[in-house]
Amino acid sequence: MAKVLEVRDLAVGYGGEPLLEEISFDVLRGEVFAILGGSGCGKSTLLRTLIGLQEPIAGRVHFRGIGPPAKAMTPPQFGVLFQSSALFGSRTLLQNVLLPLQKWTRLPAAAALAVAMARLRLVGLDRFAHHLPSAVSGGMRKRAGIARALALDPPVLFFDEPSAGLDPVTAAELDELILTLARDLGVTIVLVTHELPSILQVADQCIMLDGAAVGIIARGAPRELSERSTDPRVQAFFRRQVLPRNL
């Protein structure tokens, strides 16, 4: 299966001080790839670097073999769902989804509207197209954020903590949507999360980060790691256990 994302010897952090070093991994087309780890280990910083919002300290990110995302993509070849959804509060859900189409395409207004409505329909929000974000639930805002991320029909989506702040039922519904996008539409999804049910439900492959180790401590299929890894840090994560103080 073809590679969509190549990351090699990446170091990320702030002010030249790395939070993570020697990060290398590949993401394959159609895969759901999870970046795991505890709070503060550098997951979101790594994601920001992957999508070009932050320059790496060292190493390289190649997206579909064409180079660093921020410098090689006009229009962007990926969509992003931020943890807070990042919708514009003064715009309706439909207007939010229209924004990438208006910025990056020359579609006639009617065609852009049709595409935006199709994206909202895909995530089950077409009946709420003219609602403001404040008038819908947190889960619906997440879905609207996904619809906007899909506006340009990108081959890759990046999700930052998609289930954060959602109740279990809504989180499960979002997991089903992620699986639909990957399995039925062939979209590649890279997600940052520490939500165990979602990890085991949707992720094909993962890497686990550790702040103290300043890098990757495990990689593979999540269920295999949870059942077979002998690393106490990995087992503590998957079993929700407290690590011994000497580790």
Image (cartoon, helix red, strand yellow):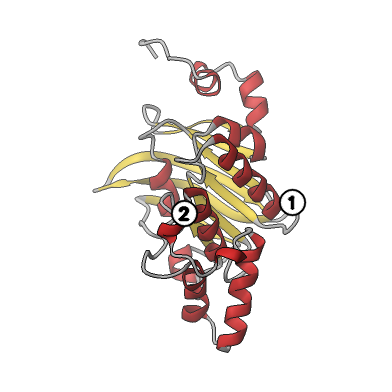
The correct choice, above or below, for 102 with respect to 232 in the image is below
State which tag comes first along the sequence, 1 or 2.
Answer: 2
Q: In this view, does 35 lie to the left or right of 88?
A: right
Answer few, some or many: residues within 10 Å of disc 1's Cα (few below 14, many 20 plus, some between 14 and 19).
some
Q: Do the residues labelled 1 and 2 touch (CB within 8 Å)?
A: no
Quadrant in which residue 20 is drawn: top left
Write down the residue under mark 2.
Answer: 50
* Visible residue check, residue 94: yes
Q: Residue at x 44, y 58 (%)?
A: 135
Quarter of the C terminus within the rendering:
top left
Q: Which of 48 and 181 is in front in this view?
A: 181
**What amino acid is at disc 1?**
Arg
The correct choice, above or below, for 112 with respect to 124 in the image is below
User: Residue 116 location in percent, x, y?
Assistant: 58, 73
| Count of marks placed on residues | 2
Q: What element carries label 1?
A: helix
User: Residue 19 location in percent, x, y?
Assistant: 34, 39
Q: In this view, does 125 lie to the left or right of 212?
A: right
Q: Which residue is drawn at 41% across and 10% down?
A: 244
Q: Which residue is drawn at 55% across and 64% down?
A: 128
Write down the residue under mark 1.
Answer: 183
- State which mark lies toward you, 1 or 2: 1
User: Residue 173 location in percent, x, y?
Assistant: 63, 44
Quadrant in which residue 227 is drawn: top right
For residue 79, the mark is none
